Each structure stands twice: as structure tokens, then as C-alpha cells.
Image (spheres, coloured by chain):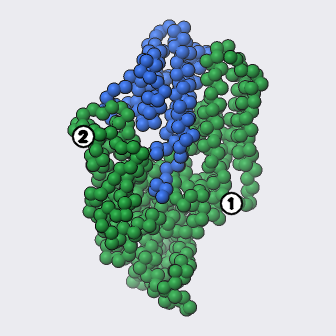
Amino acid sequence: MQTSSEYLTLALDVRRLTDSLVRIVEDGTQPVDLNASIQKVVFSLQGTGKTSIKSLRERGRFGRYAGVRAINEVFGQKERQEFAGKLRMLIETRSADERRESALASIPYFDALERRALYHHRRQQTARRLVTSR
Amino acid sequence: MSVSDEIVRQEVSGLYRFIEPLVRRCAELREDYPVYDGTSLEFFGYFEKLGRESLQFLEQLPDEILKNQDPRLSSTKRQKLLSLRSAWEDLHQYLRPALDADALHLPIPLIAALHDRLHETKDWRSYRFTLFHTDEANYFQLPSNMVGDVANHIAAEVGGTQYPAGLGHIQIPYSQADGLFLNTILAHEMGHFIYQEYASHDVEVAIDTALGAMEKETGELNEGTAALCEELVSNWVQEVFCDLFAICLIGPAFSFAFLELIAASMLIGQQDGEPDVFYRFEWEHPADVARFHYHKLLLEKLGWWQAIRTSQSAPVQVLNTCARRSKRFTVEINGALPKKVTDARLLRCFDEVCTSLVGYVPSILKRSADDVVAFKAQSPTIGEYLRRAVIPSSIIIGGKRTHPTSVVLINAGYMFLLEELPTLLANIENEKSDSVESRSRLSARLELWLLKALEDHRLLRREPKS
């Protein structure tokens, strides 16, 4: 059983991204490192097939087992493409209106991922033990 | 469907009501009793501060949720409450165990000695640990991402204060406050913090190299399998890293304590693979026999093995048994590994990385004194003192007074416990060396003497040289 800390941290990472999107929608401001974080999510959504272990590291938290598992559980192939498309639009567009629309449209996807991570977190143990309980 | 003002205010009030008593518990701590050490007070102080900042944030949250016309925005802001609650629930579980672990209920001299030893390495001088109690008969390290990162996420959500850098957390069984030997396992738990804060990058490079070589043989894996392999090997390697770190920090005493905790003397006289529980790799932990294999390699490298190898004690026999690589390991992870990756191939990756750790871990710790040389020179004299029930804070060797270091005291004391307790019992009137009760009582007394010696050592080393 993997530690639930991975899932809680995943949920909180997703929440941090969602909060950034809310700021884009509400007042048009964007944290400087948001595009890099969004890019990691896009990599993860695109990586449905075979992959190297090294490339998983490039996805940050989303390339860890908990992230891969949660994304696979929440999104089917079609949804992954839709979500990735909206995120690409978000980081590529120069139009403030399009960025705002993409951010707003991406929020429900992030919410679904956050809920899934919280679900796993609540089901699992937390601390790293010296030995497996016998 | 829109949600009413009342429902939103109730939801937010529920979380407020959850956090408020936690803040109060910290705010109402008395100064006179119970007494806490500095790191615990730092933890409580931060907890209270973050709590107050969260309450302040929650005051204005209902208006923030209700101002939005777009249901996607109001919905996600309500969901934020779920994440915040989960994060606070996680912090919640640590407060009472931290409050229980006051200075009277912790082995403070050992904890101080471990901190001193850790701080001999310049890069780690800001690292410090709060200890919590646990109801389980086990030791835990709370990963950085379980306390600090969670607190930092809360802080980011509520516009609060970031977690104090360098503060780690360890849980210790509530019943073990008076002990010394078993509690040397705390050094392993410190190792997790060092791994997470300092060494993980280096070790991950070694893991990626080993798994990369495996991929060349298997071909690219699907992402679920790749992530699974990375997770398993990383979990196993981290445990071995921490074992080796503990041995570098306090010597073979850690191996002895670990062996005792898991009753590994059952391995003596058994054939390879028996009892099977010691040969099982599980999700978070490598097989115990594999761990002992690397313990022995490191003890040899550091010179400790040469100092203890002639002992007939159970721990030394077990370490000897585990010197050879077992062929009986199993991997049990709630479902088999995918066909492309065999247990044996994955275990080879684990072995490659762990073998490299035997060289890597000693290289990151500064050692100010040669503990092994001192142990060889001083442990016979320390044994003599203990046989006469004299606390060995200062010992005389060749007419010269010396203060054994904490590492020497702990290891000499542990060897005395393993080999010479019957002699001590025989020296005491009305004690029977074959009585379990007598042995247990004398072991506890021995641990108290050594804790006192550790306490004295901190004072004596500051004495001006005559």
C-alpha cells in the first residue's frame, strides 16, 4: 500500500493550480511559474502509451505513481485530449479573453482530479513506518 | 442549481469549528508544566499561528464563494474547503501526540546526542526534530510532504506563514520514553528527513540509471508499469538509505536495535528463505534480510565489523547469516508485477542502487572523531565500569581521564547488554542471572546509567582542558 501522503500532496498541488486559474478568471493575473506547471500536466495527459522512467520525472508530481494512477482513473482518452487541448490553449494564446475562457473551462477537470486524489488519501495510511506492521 | 447563502456559511463554519479548538489547545499551554523542548514549542507556536491565519481566511470565505455568478467558480471555491479540511485533518492527528511527548516522556539525552551528531555535518546544522508519541509499537518518520508541505499548502491557500525550514518530525512509541537501546532507531527516522531534504536527488539519479538499464532489456514500459517500478524501487531504496545513515550516525547499535524490534534472532539456525516473513519485499519496505545484508557491508567498510565480529551475540550471528545474497526473496504488493518485469529483475535494480549507497552514505556525513578506534580502546574499560554499576561518563585509561563520545557509550553499552549482563547480575546480591525479570530490570537500569552518561557527556565535553 502506498502512502496517502502522496495523494494528499497531489490534491493540494492540484488545488494550487486551480487557485491560479481562478485568479486568471477573476482578475487576469497569472503566477510566473504557472505555465511550467501546466506543461507538466499536459505531458501527463498526453502520456497514455509507453514511456521511459526518466520521462516520468519530467512530469513532477503527476509522474509519480499516485499522479499517474489518479489521472488514469479520472480521465478517459477523449477527456484527456479535451483537457490537454484547453490547457495548451491557456499557455499558448495571447488573447486575455481566450486565456480566461480556457482557465474557466479547465477548472472542472482539475476539480475532478483533486477529488480523486482526496478519495485515495482518505482510504490510506499516512506515516512512513520503520517496518511493515506485522 | 445554486447553493443558498446559509448552506455555504454552514459549510465554512464547520471547518472553522474544527480548527478553532486546535488553536486553543496551543494557546493555552502553560509555561511551568508540562515542559517541552524548544522544537516542540516551535511546532506548537507555528500550529497556533497557522490556525489563526486559517480562521481569519475562513471569516471572509463565504462572501468570496457567493460573489461568483459562474457556478464553476463557486463550485471550485466550495471544493477548496474539502482540501483545506483534509489538510487540517492531517495536521490534527499530530497535535495530541506532540502534546503527550513532553520532556518527561522522551529520552531527551539520546535525542540531544543524535542532534549533536547530526550537526557535526555543516549542511545539516539547521535540521532539528520534534518528537511525537504514537500508540503503535513502531517508529515513524512523518515525510516532509506530510507536515511541512501540507502546512505550506494551507499557508498558500489562506495567505499564511510558511512552515519553519529544517524542522522534521518523528514518532516514538509512547511506552519507550525511558529506553535507550531500542530508541537508537530514531537515527533511521532522522535519515528519512536527510533523504527527503538533502540526498534524494543523488539517489534518484542512481535509481534512474538502474531502471534505465532494465528498460533497455524489457523495452519501454507502459506508464503505469514504469511509475510502479519507480515507486517500489524508490520506497525500498529509501529504507536502506536510512538504515545506512543510522549506522553511520551511531554505529552498529542501530542494527542491534532494529534486529530486536523485529525479532530477527528467529533467523538463527534457519535455512535460506525461512521464516518467509523476513524475505518479503512489500510496497513500502524491502525484505529485512536484504536490509541486514547492506548493514553488514557498511559495518565492514566503516571498520565496525572487525570490532564486533567475534561476538557470539544474536545480532552479530544474524548479520553473519545475511552476509550472503539470498535467492529466496519474494515481492508481495497486492497484485503481481506486470509480466514484462520479473521480481528478480526489479530486485537487481534495487541491489545495484543499494550497493552504491554503501559508498555514498558515508561520504555525505562528516565524522569528527574516529568512533571505531575509540570504541576498540574504550569499550573494555566502559564494560568494567558498568560491571561495578559505575556510570562511565569519565573513564581512566592508562592513567588518563577521558570522556567517551555518545557513539562509543551507546555501542559499548549495547555490547555489554548483549554479552555481559549475566556477569553484572552475578555481582549483585540476591539477583539470579537466569531470571527473565531480573535481566529485564537490570537492562532498564543499564539504559538509565547510559542515558545519564550521555547527559554528562554534553557537559563534560565543554570542560576546559586541564
Q: Position of residue B432 (x, y in %)?
A: 52, 88
Horizontally, is B179 left or right of B254 in the view?
right
Q: Which numbered disc covers residue B213? A: 2
Q: Are marks 1 and 2 in contact (CB under 8 Å)?
A: no
Which subunit holds the residue at mark 2?
B
Name the subunit of mark 1: B
Residue under the point 32% across and 55% down: B329
- B11 is higher (above) or lower (below) than B237: above
Given residues B295 and B326, the one toward you in this image is: B326
Q: Which chain is blue?
A: A
The hue used for chain B is green
Q: Position of residue B300 (x, y in %)?
A: 30, 65
Three-letter code for the amino acid on which mark 2 is drawn: Ala
Residue B111 sits in quarter: bottom right
Q: Which residue is mark 1?
A: B35
Q: CA distance from mark 1 to mark 2?
A: 54 Å
Q: Residue at x 46, y 74 (%)?
A: B413
- Res. A82 mark: none
Going 34% across and 64% down the picture, which residue do you hit?
B274
Is tag 1's residue or tag 2's residue first in the polypeptide sequence? 1
Answer above or below: position of B255 versus B154.
below
